């Protein structure tokens, strides 16, 4: 009979080590753990998203969600860690093109990425999108046979896009699946037009954010007024992109809003906290 309770001490041997899985971005410095030093404590950067966590990345369309997930994938794969990438929105051949461009821009060995990224194309498979068990059976086979370390689902929203009342159940099922198979995970979730851009809410409400270990929110703001232009020191019509760790139950994190850009090579470059960005530009040159 399976036990239903434990004394806390009995869980020591099963406790998860706290260290980071690199994203290849400044996010690696934005999660931290606290360590004792002399008679006090210091914050030490974790080096990435927490090991064996499931992190939700949400934001408006074209805010950089898939860019961040793909960058995480190519960085990990270039270090000889196996990635299972479940593409729900875009056919797999487009993923190949995007990852190749990112690898070249970052100076990574694409031959390693070719062998270390395993793709399940759910975008072209109705059964995978409609039947979570069928998809998870295939995922389990890949994890077992290819010995993957990380799983990306882009997007989890696509698995309940016309049945949002089931969002919590579906997200919980995939969350538990990744925990069972000891995979570090990234879920991409889409926002609906009526949802607040800077919040953790996405399609299905807060179902994803409540279940996962942490949420990263990406946003883009159109500089549409003279007031915006003066505040950000950007021309009217420009786009300001921001990123924020909304929460993480596993470790400490920087909760400030940061400014980032998508580089010409299609990668994420996090620049500075928003307040510093505004302050530095206010003391700099005039609007271009």
Image (tube, rainbow, N blue to C red):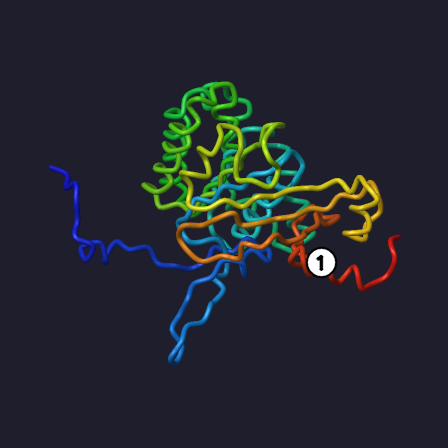
Considering every residue shown, the one lying at the far bottom of the view is 38
Q: Is residue 89 left or right of residue 208?
A: right
Q: Is residue 7 left or right of residue 226?
A: left
In this rendered view, identify the residue nearer to me: 114 or 2: 2
123 relative to 278, above or below = above
Q: Is residue 286 left or right of residue 239?
A: right
Considering every residue shown, the one lying at the far front of the view is 227
Q: Position of residue 50 (x, y in %)?
A: 44, 54
Please identify the quadrant where the N terminus is shown.
top left
Considering every residue shown, the one lying at the far left of the view is 1
Residue name at image x 35 percent, y 46 percent: 182
In this rendered view, identify the residue nearer to me: 142 or 58: 58
Residue name at image x 51 percent, y 21 percent: 125
Residue name at image x 80 percent, y 64 percent: 283
Q: Position of residue 60 (x, y in %)?
A: 63, 35
Disc 1, SS = helix
Mark 1 lies on residue: 277
Q: Residues within 10 Å of mark 1 (few under 14, many from 20)?
A: some
Image quadrant in which you'd find residue 192: top right
Q: Position of residue 92 (x, y in %)?
A: 58, 32
Q: Position of residue 142 (x, y in %)?
A: 41, 37
Is residue 91 visible in the rendered structure shown here? no
197 relative to 164, above or below = below
């Amino acid at each position: 009979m399976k036990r239903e309770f434990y004394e806390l001490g009995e869980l020591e041997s099963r406790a998860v080590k706290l260290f980071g899985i690199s994203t290849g971005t400044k996010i690696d410095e934005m999660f931290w753990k606290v360590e004792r030093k002399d008679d006090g404590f210091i914050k030490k950067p974790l080096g990435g998203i927490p090991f064996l966590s499931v992190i939700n990345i949400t934001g408006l369309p074209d805010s950089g969600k898939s860019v961040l997930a793909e960058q995480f994938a190519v960085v990990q794969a270039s270090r000889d860690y196996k990635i299972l990438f479940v593409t729900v929105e875009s056919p797999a051949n487009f993923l190949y093109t995007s990852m190749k461009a990112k690898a070249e821009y970052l100076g990574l060995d694409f031959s390693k990425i070719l062998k270390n990224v395993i793709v399940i194309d759910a975008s072209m498979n109705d059964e995978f999108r409609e039947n979570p068990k069928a998809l998870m059976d295939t995922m389990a086979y890949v994890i077992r046979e290819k010995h993957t370390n990380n799983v990306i689902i882009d997007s989890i929203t696509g698995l309940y896009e016309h049945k949002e009342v089931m969002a919590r159940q579906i997200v919980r099922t995939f969350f538990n699946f990744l925990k069972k198979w000891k995979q570090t995970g990234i879920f991409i979730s889409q926002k609906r037009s009526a949802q607040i851009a800077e919040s953790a809410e996405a399609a299905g409400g807060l179902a994803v954010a409540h279940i996962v270990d942490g949420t990263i929110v990406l946003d883009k703001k159109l500089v549409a007024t003279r007031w915006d232009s003066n505040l950000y020191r950007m021309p009217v019509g420009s786009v300001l992109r921001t990123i924020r760790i909304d929460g993480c139950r596993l470790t400490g994190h920087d909760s400030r809003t940061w400014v980032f850009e998508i580089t010409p090579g299609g990668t994420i470059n996090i620049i500075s906290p928003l307040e510093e960005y505004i302050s530095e530009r206010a003391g700099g040159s005039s609007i271009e």
